[in-house]
Image (spheres, coloured by chain):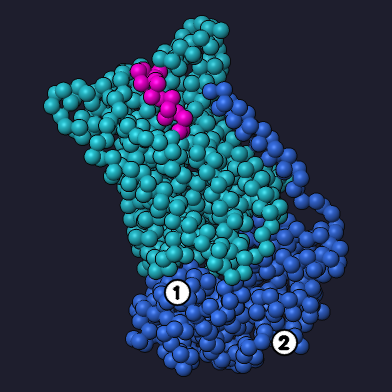
């Protein structure tokens, strides 16, 4: 009993220490401090933020979580958010914040750095990097020639039970939207219906789809290209069972962008503006190329070695603003029981 | 438990009811937030969500998984508890610790480890396996505790009248442990309904994965709220079901003997299967996934630079925050638990059920509601450790209620009456008699809340102070970039830190003490309390 009381006291002490912790970590209202919500991985973005801090002397309070969580958080916080900049994993999340009137306009000298088609139309956010939709295939079962050049073929019987994808994933859903825009509603509906009937392997995210291909559970996976490179960096490219096939011009091979927005409360904040400007600077764009194998969006910065040029992937019939109708795409997926 | 114990106090305890209502109001924040959101959403959009062909499948899967995991956890947990509390067993303390160890294992970590070894695992059976084995201790621990204080007197009578060993167990002991079994089953069922990490990794579509998709693709909080309300509905059915079943049990328990002997069973030929069961649960829930993850550390080609200071910081944050959360959880659960133990009636039942509901919700939903709440009520404390600890308290208060209720229920009201007769106030009586005797149970409640808080991820991501990483957050950050090598030290650290409360909960020491208190365990405690009350 005595020992128990000791532990109970220790517990109370710990709780008191928690209060003390509160004092230490409360955000400071320092002009030179910038709060950034980062919907991307800390291991990838952290070093880049350090570079920014060193160069500008601005202290960045970075809050890391997945993009969906941070988007939900920002929507819930509304205009009371402590965030000044949001670095997002996908454009859809930024669009949702823009629709809720939570973002400030990006100054045009920054917004104009990124070519049309890779950034927002109304300067509500700015594109930072691009990632291509690709087919990952099992290199032990298939040669590149045997992998279809277009997603249209995936509804065929020979791929029954062999295609993995994440129907709830935002970049998959923008591909569905691209399919609707490029091939028409009827063709897109037929494709989704055909896939749903083709015994697909449904996953929660791109990484899980890639893992299925890597472990031989599925022959094909519809993913974003850079997941492959990240995993190759961890285990060695020669150990990757999955291989990538790019689909130039096909709806299944479109380029999605990541981007950054300035939150409404920080509309006139110099530090916020400096950070967004830094993200589309040559230095940061090179960093993304080298560390995350993504496409740079700033003209003049070379794409990662071994990747097809971004211009070849972009379908001339598709404008980024066409991808707004993601709601209809979700309805299509829902009607076919995929989400 | 005796009829004397179960006698409800005649007077309505308004102070206690008021305190309980405050606790329930706080615990109801997530549910209220959801209902308000659903009511203010566009009805057409809500109808569209319900119209989806997939909704019946999701609800069906959630129900199927929760039911099968609960049944499995009970089927494995009750025999485990019997072995730990009533069988002659070598190394009892060690087995007790092993039996509690799965508590330290987050479902996502167990699933992750199994998948790293067997990538083809998916769907219902994979989710069932991992969730069942991870949740067995929720049944084993309370049932073993109930068996330790129960008696075998009626079993023996039944035996002499010709019943077999199983028949006399069902007649004599089962009514004594039934409330503990139900309390454990309730926690398992709600935990399974709310789990996201484990089911998502095994690609088994349920309501929680659909809620996550609503946030991640459509960025629609309304759609997520509709699905979450469905989940609350299921949780409500489960809570009501448990109360109905417990009500019946409470009436039957009056027939149980007042005190008596506890006979230890000799296992004989059942030794091998018994030990196999005790070994199987921790093996599936902990040993296999951890072994696989550790082997990844050794084989991962680039073992990322390991940052010891960062790990130490994360351990410190985890311990402090979960301890704070446990204190809040117990503070909220105390009035509800005491009320439920000492009083009856529709109002008491309503208060207790409402206390449990938030446990059926996934962490992201609870986290968002607390974001809204703290920004509206205490904006200055938003994204501080205080609000996060408070959030843990609300999330895991339901796990504390059951333990506090049964611990309080076991304190004989006659002792309180003695203290009152001696002129002590209600408050002093509660503090020096009831709380003193129920302390082990209150302590267990705190530990259960703490171990849950250590493993919590989604609400932590929402509510933590910017830049404060817990072990679960660090682990998540590393699994996200498929860096097995870098994730492993954090996985092991989380398991070791969470194993401390799990170890204390295993009550390995109590197991030894209990053997000395075979006869009328209440007597010694009662003597102590009487002394205290007189002093």
Is there any visible trace of residue B148 in the rendered image? yes
Q: Is residue A257 left or right of residue B425?
A: right
Q: Nearer the viewer, residue A127 or B106?
A: B106
Q: Callout 2: few (<14), some (14-19), or many (20+) C-alpha neighbours within 10 Å?
A: some
Residue located at (20% from left, 32% from top): B165
Label number found at residue A215: 1
| Segment tinted magenta in the rendering | B507-522
- Percent position of residue B235, x then y: 41, 47
Q: How many marks?
A: 2
Residue located at (75% from left, 85% from top): A301
The cyan-tinted chain is B
Is there any visible trace of residue A209 in the rendered image? no
* Quarter residue B347 falls in: top left
- Percent position of residue A199, x then y: 35, 77
Q: Are marks 2 and 1 in contact (CB under 8 Å)?
A: no
- Chain designation of label 2: A
């Amino acid at each position: 009993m005595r020992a128990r009381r000791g532990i109970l006291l220790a517990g109370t002490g710990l709780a008191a220490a928690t209060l003390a912790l509160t004092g230490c970590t409360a955000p400071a209202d320092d002009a030179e401090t910038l709060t950034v919500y980062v919907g991307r991985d800390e291991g990838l973005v952290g070093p880049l933020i350090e570079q920014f801090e060193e160069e500008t002397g601005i202290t960045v309070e970075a809050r890391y979580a997945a993009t969906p969580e941070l988007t939900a958080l920002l929507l819930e916080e509304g205009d009371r958010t402590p965030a000044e900049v949001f670095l997002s994993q996908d454009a859809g999340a930024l669009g949702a914040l823009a629709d809720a009137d939570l973002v400030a306009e990006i100054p045009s000298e920054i917004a104009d750095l990124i070519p049309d088609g890779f950034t927002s139309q109304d300067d509500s956010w700015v594109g930072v990097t691009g990632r291509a939709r690709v087919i990952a295939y099992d290199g032990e079962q298939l040669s590149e020639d045997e992998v279809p050049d277009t997603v249209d073929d995936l509804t065929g019987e020979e791929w029954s039970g062999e295609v993995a994808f994440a129907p709830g994933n935002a970049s998959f859903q923008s591909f569905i939207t691209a399919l609707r825009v490029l091939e028409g509603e009827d063709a897109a509906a037929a494709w989704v219906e055909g896939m749903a009937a083709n015994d697909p392997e449904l996953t929660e995210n791109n990484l899980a789809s890639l893992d299925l291909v890597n472990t031989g559970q599925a022959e094909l996976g519809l993913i974003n290209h850079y997941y492959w490179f990240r995993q190759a960096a961890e285990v060695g490219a020669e150990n990757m069972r999955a291989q990538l096939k790019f689909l130039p011009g096909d709806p299944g091979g479109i380029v999605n962008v990541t981007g950054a927005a300035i939150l409404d409360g920080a509309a006139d904040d110099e530090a916020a503006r400096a950070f967004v400007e830094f993200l589309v600077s040559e230095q940061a764009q090179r960093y993304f190329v080298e560390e995350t194998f993504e496409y740079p969006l700033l003209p003049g910065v070379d794409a990662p070695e071994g990747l097809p040029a971004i211009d070849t992937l972009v379908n001339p019939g598709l404008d980024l603003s066409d991808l707004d109708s993601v709601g209809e795409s979700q309805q299509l997926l829902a009607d076919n029981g995929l989400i | 438990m005796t009829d004397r114990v179960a006698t409800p106090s005649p007077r309505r305890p308004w102070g206690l009811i008021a305190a309980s209502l405050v606790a329930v109001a706080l615990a109801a924040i997530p549910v209220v937030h959801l209902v308000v959101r659903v009511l203010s959403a566009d009805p057409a959009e809500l109808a569209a969500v319900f119209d989806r062909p997939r909704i019946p499948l999701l609800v069906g899967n959630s129900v199927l998984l929760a039911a099968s995991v609960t049944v499995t956890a009970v089927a494995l947990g009750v025999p485990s508890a019997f072995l730990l509390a009533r069988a002659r067993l070598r190394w009892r303390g060690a087995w007790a610790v092993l039996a509690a160890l799965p508590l330290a294992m987050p479902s996502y970590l167990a699933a992750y480890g199994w998948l790293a070894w067997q990538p083809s695992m998916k769907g219902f059976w994979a989710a069932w396996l991992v969730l069942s084995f991870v949740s067995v201790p929720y049944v084993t621990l309370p049932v073993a505790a109930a068996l330790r204080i129960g008696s075998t007197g009626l079993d023996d009578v039944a035996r002499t009248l010709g019943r077999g060993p199983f028949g006399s167990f069902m007649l004599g002991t089962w009514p004594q442990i039934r409330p503990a079994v139900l309390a454990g089953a309730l926690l398992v069922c709600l935990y399974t309904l709310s789990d996201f990490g484990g089911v998502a990794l095994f690609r088994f579509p349920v309501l929680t994965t659909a809620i996550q998709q609503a946030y991640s693709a459509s960025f629609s909080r309304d759609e997520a709220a509709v699905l979450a309300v469905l989940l609350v509905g299921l949780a409500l059915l489960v809570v009501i079901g448990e109360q109905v079943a417990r009500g019946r049990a409470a009436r039957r328990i009056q027939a149980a003997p007042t005190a008596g002997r506890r006979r230890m069973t000799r296992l004989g030929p059942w030794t091998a299967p018994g030990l196999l069961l005790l070994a199987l649960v921790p093996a599936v829930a902990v040993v296999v996934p951890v072994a696989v993850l550790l082997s990844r550390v050794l084989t991962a080609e680039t073992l990322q630079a390991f940052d010891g200071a960062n790990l130490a910081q994360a351990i410190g944050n985890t311990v402090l925050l979960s301890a704070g959360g446990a204190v809040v959880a117990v503070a909220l659960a105390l009035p509800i638990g005491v009320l439920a133990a000492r009083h009856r009636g529709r109002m008491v039942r309503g208060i207790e059920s409402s206390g449990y509901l938030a446990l059926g919700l996934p962490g992201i939903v609870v986290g968002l509601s607390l974001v809204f709440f703290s920004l509206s009520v205490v904006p200055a404390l938003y994204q501080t450790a205080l609000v996060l600890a408070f959030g843990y308290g609300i999330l895991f208060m339901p796990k504390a209620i059951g333990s506090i209720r049964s611990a309080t229920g076991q304190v004989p009201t006659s002792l309180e009456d003695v203290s009152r007769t001696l002129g002590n106030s209600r408050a002093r009586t509660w503090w020096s008699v009831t709380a003193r005797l129920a302390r082990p149970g209150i302590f267990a409640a705190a530990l259960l809340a703490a171990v849950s808080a250590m493993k919590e991820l989604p609400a932590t991501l929402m509510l933590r102070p910017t830049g404060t990483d817990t072990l679960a957050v660090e682990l998540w950050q590393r699994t996200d970039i498929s860096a097995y090598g870098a994730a492993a030290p954090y996985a092991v650290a989380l398991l070791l830190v969470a194993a401390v409360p799990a170890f204390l909960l295993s009550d390995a020491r109590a197991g030894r003490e209990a053997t000395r208190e075979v006869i009328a365990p209440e007597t010694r405690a009662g003597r102590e309390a009487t002394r205290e009350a007189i002093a």
